[in-house]
Image: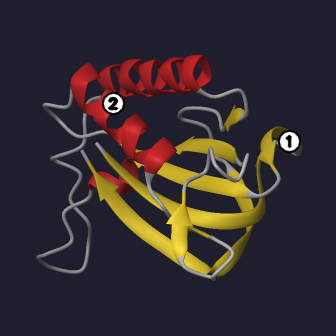
Amino acid sequence: MKALIQRVKNASVTVEGETVGAIDHGLLALVGVEKGDSEADAEKLLHKLLHYRVFSDHDDKMNLNVQQVNGGLLLVSQFTLAADTRKGLRPSFSSAALPEEGHRLFDYLVSSARSAWPTVATGQFGANMQVALVNDGPVTFLLES
């Protein structure tokens, strides 16, 4: 599994004009599920999401995680993260998990996140989503399980 994470001042996801998920300060995670990914990969990714130190401490060093700053976690499925872009001018999605498996593992990640942290919001799997955010820094990292 992959997650492109961004430290945000706020972020939201809208589907057909309705906000389906929003957080104030915290992490926006765009999540891609690849063939061969498992629940163990989701657990490893969740551990990184909750413990990755990307928030500034009192010395302005990135030493704090989302839990230590009482931030939100906005999880948004994005199968395009699994694209192979090495050849040509059109992405290949051959390494992306099938939609059913991607949905199952994304839901597993969301459920596990909600069990571990109280402030978790999501987009809507498979929907055409509009994601709005104010990136704080900017701070962006690609995490892989």
Viewer-proximal residue among 144 and 48: 48
Give the x, y percent position of residue 114. 61, 22
Residue 38 showing in the rendered view: yes
Query: Along the polypeptide, which appears first: circle 2 or circle 1?
Result: 1
Q: Which residue is mark 2?
A: 42
Residue 78 visible in the shown view: no
Classify 115 as above or below 121: above
Q: Image point 77% across, 58% down: which residue?
A: 25
Q: Residue at x 20, y 59 (%)?
A: 92
Instruction: State whether residue 71 is above or below residue 9.
Output: above
Residue with the mark numbered 1: 19
Give the percent coordinates (x, y) of residue 39: 28, 20
Residue 105 as seen in the image, left or right of residue 1 = right
Structural crowding at the residue carrying mark 1, measured as other residues with C-alpha within 10 Å and reported as few (<14), some (14–19) or many (≥20): some
Q: Position of residue 132 (x, y in %)?
A: 75, 63
Q: Which element carries disc 1, helix, strand or loop?
A: strand
Relative image position of residue 28 (x, y in whole percent): 61, 54
Residue 6 higher or lower than 88, as above or below: above
